[in-house]
Amino acid sequence: MSAAEIVNWVNGIIWSPALIYLCLGAGLFFSILTRFVQVRQIKEMAKLLINGSSSAQGISSFQALSVSLSGRVGVGNIAGVAAAIGFGGPGAVFWMWLVAFLGASTAYVESTLGQIYKVEYQGQYRGGPAFYFDRGLGQRWLGILFAIAAIVSCGLFLPGIQANAVGNAFTQITGQGAIVFGDIGVFKLLALIVVVSLLSIIIFGGIKRIARFAELVVPFMALGYILMAVIIVVMNIQELPGVIKLIFTDAFSPMAGIGAAIGWGVKRGVYSNEAGQGTGPHAAAAAEVQHPAQQGFVQAFSIYVDTLFVCSATAFMILITGMYNVQGTLEAGQFIVQHVSPATEIGSPAFTQMAVSTVFGGFGQIFVALAVFFFAFTTIVAYYYIAETNITYLSYITKTPSLLFITKCFIILSVAYGIISATGYIWGIGDIGVGLMAWINIIGIIVTYFVWKPTIKALKDYEEQQKAGVKEFVFDPVKLGIRNATFWEERLKRKQQSRSDD
């Protein structure tokens, strides 16, 4: 059995229909429990983005949103959406929207948990699934299991996809140049030097530098990409009603089969917005907020930005210009729908580049390459932070010296290899990493709900204070019956002591 066959076999087990329906089911479950908080509190979400502030130990809500978005908005928003359409048909877009809408409630739950059970360690706020499984659920073994899965996935598997895309995007703009060795040109090596140098400067600066970088780059690149899509849609506005109709009709009578439409839509949706995957809570926990629910709201909003805005931008550009093929269960080289050359690679940015080029000509190729470059690079930075946080968790519970320097060096080597390597089955390896974390995290947060219901208690407490019109929110975990939220217990004691001293 070849390496590619092994990867596909493992993927088939991890991404069985069980995980696909678990993602959708968890989103529906938490949507009902929170009374669709992703809709009811959307005004509060926008308000919190503007009003947040940072501290010496933590970053602002907007910075935390930017860091998490830098992980969510990546190659999956361009190549992943193209793959969903190419293998699942236009109806896959509807299932991406559905998993985003339901997943926003899952994002609220996991990110609020990240805030409730965060710790202050070595002068920084740290948190994530490993921390809340350990401290909130009382299952350290599960925290360790997730930490290991996250370190392997975000430190080894996932950066390769993004780094490979960065290298290819760079050479799409510059060309290969003179071949240095094998099929690697001088400009691919230049891309390696530039990316590794920039990555080193950012990750060796800690979360504050990562947050500042994300805060500057992420909003700019997302807005620019969405604006480009709007222009293309306006230029083809007469086609818009037909495209919307196609998405909805194909969702329930899919040309590629209902399994393909749902499977590819959910898989690429979860890969892109990461709701339930357990990556978002790491950045959420680093935020400085008055109440844990606040960052849960902000992270729920990030799902909308990723899928309903950025992924939809890609989908509409591809569908409204007709620059796509749909590969079903037919023989190799045959298509259910064929609008472009059969040689066009489905799981790549090619459909998107061709769509942009219909309006902007040669500039379209350059624009998409630049978008891939920035989307992928910021995602690599986010992956590093997730790996770093889980290395820190293992150091925190074992009271041993941190291995962060080694982690930094390791991910730099992983990125360097990803830039110069061929794509091959790299998407399949990334899917394994995503699936592993999703399995552990979704089951864990569901079990946590049935044991303590901490996120529902936090939501109810926050909304009661909202109705009371308080100016400063207070979170008292002991009063709410939430155990082991020691960070918030100690913070409340310090505030009460400060008031009594006054």
Image (cartoon, rainbow, N blue to C red):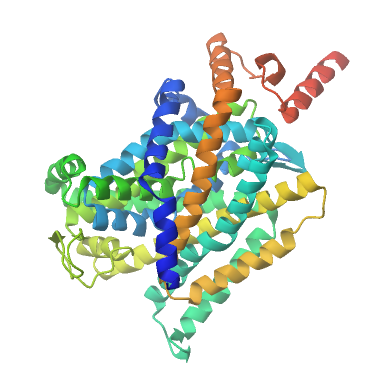
- Asked if 387 appears above or below 334 in the picture, the reply is above
Extreme residue toward the front, this view: 1
- Residue pictured at 26% horizontal, 62% vertical: 351
- Which quarter of the rendered picture does the C terminus lie within? top right
- Asked if 111 appears above or below 268 in the picture, the reply is above
- Residue pictured at 61% horizontal, 49% vertical: 211
Relative side of 202 to 405, left or right: left
**How many numbered dots are placed on residues in this image?**
0
- Asked if 77 appears above or below 100 in the picture, the reply is below
- Which quarter of the rendered picture does the N terminus lie within? bottom left
Relative side of 395 to 68, left or right: right
- Residue pictured at 77% horizontal, 45% vertical: 396
- Decide which of 10, 76 is in the foreground and name it: 10
Picture coordinates of residue 432, whole percent (x, y): 47, 56
Relative side of 43 to 127, left or right: left
Picture coordinates of residue 65, whole percent (x, y): 53, 41
* Residue 261 visible in the shown view: yes
- Decide which of 225, 391 is in the foreground and name it: 391
- Image quarter of residue 11: bottom left
Picture coordinates of residue 260, whole percent (x, y): 26, 50
- Decide which of 287, 394 is in the foreground and name it: 394
Picture coordinates of residue 207, whole percent (x, y): 66, 50
Extreme residue toward the right, this view: 501
- Image quarter of residue 349: bottom left
* Residue 425 visible in the shown view: no
